Image (tube, rainbow, N blue to C red):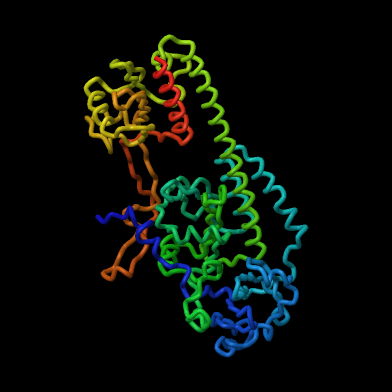
């Protein structure tokens, strides 16, 4: 079996999805020279809006076809992205204006704005209560459940999922709201290669990605090469950007006719996505896109608030326990006894299952800890590392050889050196926690290559595929590691006094 573990970083990361030279057929793209106002590049479906072939429009003044008179002058002069409405013929069309130093890139939706489209007051009334629900959610699971239900109802998609990324960029479905005949992916994990790094990076620049019709043919640009830059057009910021064939095949295998993905951010970084699926083609109008962009910000803000609250609670708990532990050491005649057996002790502070203190050629233990022979070998292993600061791992059996019967007992290690050169340490251990990951399809089959390695396909099945992992403990959190380093300095000071 091929090793697919590096596809996201080594293979998928190199796919130039922003240079595709085509647009989706639900809109028209025009590139205008900012200096003279000429149309230098456009999509070949421009005739559907302007009743003139793209080849004849190229090189002519943009103002012959559309007026930007109602667009504020500073929008044209400054770089940025702006939502605008354009009058074309007798109809209004939603459009996005991208401004950079040398050109204007304009995305225009073919569908005209309906005359009876909801006004701002009605729109506010519709979203006010759902927004309040989201802002009052007290836990992350509750927030995600509310968000999925609300957005499905407001948008009309057949399924809406809230999807978060882990440290390896695998995605986990936290909540979903769906029609009964849509397949459930609740609790499933999807491999990072499903949304590779180039795609994830674009979500930092674009709030959403919309694919209204999986079956619709893409429309090429004319000319293919940008005449001023003599390169392909960078479409990173374009929502109309055509969809790579492999992703269309991915949606087909999922039996999805239309999709929309909306970013969720935390501290300015990508945290997850709102993933929307529809069984058939489904065009999102300007109102729906504005709704998703608005809720993206509201949900992202609440995620950040809830996680900050959790971190604050954890920090307060650890700070309180640490202060009590240090107070107990200061009142004790034996530092190691206070650390191991006091109230509180290091087991409570670090949520550990066992600990050993090796000091002054003596060892003392509490809880589940290695036997004498294993401890001797472990100390030799640590001695080679010549630790100057703490060492931690949650997969000790994979980096240190031990007997099978020991692995479940000490899968996690947090080593706090006192005098590493003298093999003096405070060692904390955590037991193994067996994990089961419910993958959406076999992750080892996420990509299939043909004989030509340039031709590849996504997996065919997204059915439950379980992976059982052993040999690891709960990870030592960043806060616990920082506290362990603080404790190391305190112990070292106390040892020097003694």
Q: In this orientation, which residue lies closer to the viewer: 374 or 468?
A: 374
Q: Identify the residue at the far right of this view.
A: 121
For the point 50% across and 75% down, which residue is it? 233
Image quadrant where one finds the N terminus: bottom left
For the point 52% across and 74% down, which residue is it? 23
Q: In this orientation, which residue lies closer to the viewer: 368 or 267?
A: 267
Q: In this orientation, which residue lies closer to the viewer: 89 or 159?
A: 89
Q: Name the spot of residue 342 as percent of width and height, x first.
A: 45, 14
Image quadrant where one finds the C terminus: top left
Q: Is residue 89 above or below residue 82?
A: below
Total labels drawn: 0
Q: Is residue 195 above or below residue 438?
A: below
Quarter assignment of residue 309: top right
Q: Name the spot of residue 198 as percent of width and height, x first.
A: 45, 61
For the point 41% across and 54% down, which residue is it? 192
Q: Is residue 145 visible?
A: yes
Quarter assignment of residue 485: top left
Q: Identify the residue at the far bottom of this view.
A: 56
Q: In this orientation, which residue lies closer to the viewer: 417 or 143?
A: 417
Q: Name the spot of residue 315 as percent of width and height, x first.
A: 54, 31
């Amino acid at each position: 079996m091929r090793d697919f573990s590096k596809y996201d970083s080594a293979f998928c990361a190199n796919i130039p999805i922003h240079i595709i030279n085509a647009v989706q057929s639900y809109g028209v793209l025009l590139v205008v020279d900012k200096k003279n106002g000429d149309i230098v590049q456009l999509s070949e479906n421009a005739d559907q809006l302007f009743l003139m072939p793209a080849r004849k429009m190229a090189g002519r003044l943009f103002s012959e076809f559309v007026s930007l008179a109602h667009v504020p002058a500073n929008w044209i002069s400054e770089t940025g992205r702006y939502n605008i409405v354009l009058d074309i013929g007798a109809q209004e069309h939603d459009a996005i204006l991208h401004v950079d130093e040398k050109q204007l890139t304009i995305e225009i939706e073919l569908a005209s704005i309906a005359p009876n489209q909801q006004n701002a007051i009605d729109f506010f009334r519709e979203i006010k209560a759902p927004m309040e629900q989201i802002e009052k959610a007290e836990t992350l699971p509750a927030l995600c459940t509310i968000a999925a239900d609300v957005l499905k109802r407001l948008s009309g998609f057949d399924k809406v999922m809230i999807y978060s990324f882990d440290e390896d960029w695998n995605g986990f479905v936290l909540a979903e709201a769906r029609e009964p005949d849509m397949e459930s992916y609740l609790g499933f994990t999807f491999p990072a290669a499903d949304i590779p790094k180039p795609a994830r990076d674009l979500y930092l620049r674009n709030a959403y990605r919309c694919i209204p019709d999986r079956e619709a043919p893409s429309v090429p640009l004319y000319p293919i090469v940008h005449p001023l830059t003599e390169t392909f057009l960078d479409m990173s910021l374009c929502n109309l950007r055509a969809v790579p064939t492999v992703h269309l095949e991915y949606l087909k295998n999922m039996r999805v006719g239309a999709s929309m993905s909306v970013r969720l951010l935390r501290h300015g970084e990508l945290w997850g996505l709102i993933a929307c699926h529809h069984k058939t083609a489904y065009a999102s109008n300007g109102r729906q896109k504005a709704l998703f962009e608005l809720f993206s910000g509201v949900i992202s803000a609440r995620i950040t608030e809830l996680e900050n609250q959790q971190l604050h609670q954890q920090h307060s708990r650890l700070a309180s326990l640490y202060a009590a532990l240090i107070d107990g050491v200061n009142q004790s005649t034996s530092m190691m006894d206070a650390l191991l057996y006091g109230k509180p002790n290091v087991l409570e502070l670090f949520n550990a299952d066992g600990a050993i203190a090796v000091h002054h050629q003596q060892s003392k233990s509490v809880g589940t800890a290695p036997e004498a022979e294993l401890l001797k070998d472990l100390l030799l292993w640590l001695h080679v590392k010549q630790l100057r600061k703490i060492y931690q791992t949650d997969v000790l059996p994979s980096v240190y050889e031990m007997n099978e019967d020991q692995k479940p007992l000490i899968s996690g290690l947090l080593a706090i050196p006192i005098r590493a050169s003298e093999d003096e340490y405070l060692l904390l251990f955590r037991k193994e926690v067996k994990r089961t990951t419910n993958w959406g399809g076999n992750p080892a089959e996420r990509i299939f290559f043909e004989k030509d390695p340039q031709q590849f396909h996504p997996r065919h099945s997204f059915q439950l595929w379980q992976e059982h992992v052993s040999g690891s403990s709960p990870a030592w959190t960043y806060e616990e590691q920082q506290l362990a380093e603080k404790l190391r300095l305190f112990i070292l000071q106390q040892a020097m006094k003694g």
